[in-house]
Amino acid sequence: MLGKLRNLLIAFSLLTFVAGCSTSAEPEVINTPEVEVAAIPEEPAIPEKRTLNDGVFSEAQASAGQYVYDNSCKTCHDMRFYRGVLRSWANQPLIDFWYSILGEMPADNPGSLSDNEYTEVIAYILSENGFPAGDTELDPNNGMEQISIVAP
């Protein structure tokens, strides 16, 4: 019993001491220097999914692609060949088709064309299979993974 009384007396003394430390009835305001907070950058926009029907290549690319196609592809592949190929690639990303052609064509010298030439050939193939040209150029480094192949 004396232990409890002693503990209460100590607690009361501490409370009295703490309460007596403040000389003002208002809370003390501590001034701190202003801190500039950096703006949080917005997350990059997720590219929207598109299909070959959305004008994913330019007319200029298709025109340039005809020259490359005539000199590097036409001897083995006519346009009917690509109708079937595009059907078999339906619902796949266009970038996968691009990599496939890059790695396998021309059959006698795969990978021998520039990236730009492969892209132009694809634009020409798409154009010849009835897909519309658009205002932006097809670019394997900018959104081709978001373009889905649809059957012509």
Image (spheres, grey):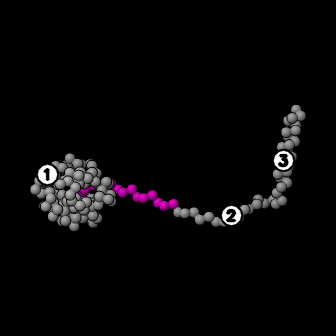
Nearest to N terminus: mark 1 or mark 2: 2
Is label 3 in contact with label 1 (beta carbons under 8 Å)?
no
Which of the 4 image quarters holds residue 130? bottom left
Main SS of the magenta part reads loop
In the picture of the structure, the residue carrying the numbered disc 1 is 81
Q: Position of residue 27 (x, y in %)?
A: 76, 59
* Magenta segment: 40-53
- Label of residue 17 in the image: none
Q: Is residue 129 left or right of residue 21?
A: left
Which residue shows up at 33% across the image and 59% down it? 142
Residue 84 sits above or below residue 124 on the image: above
CA–CA distance in space, label 3 to label 2: 30 Å
Mark 3 to mark 1: distance in Å?
A: 92 Å
- Which residue is identified by label 3? 14
Amino acid under disc 3: Leu
Q: Give the crowd class for mark 2: few <14, some 14-19, many >=20 residues within 10 Å.
A: few
The residue pinned by badge 2 equals: 32
Give, as a three-letter code, the residue at label 1.
Answer: Phe
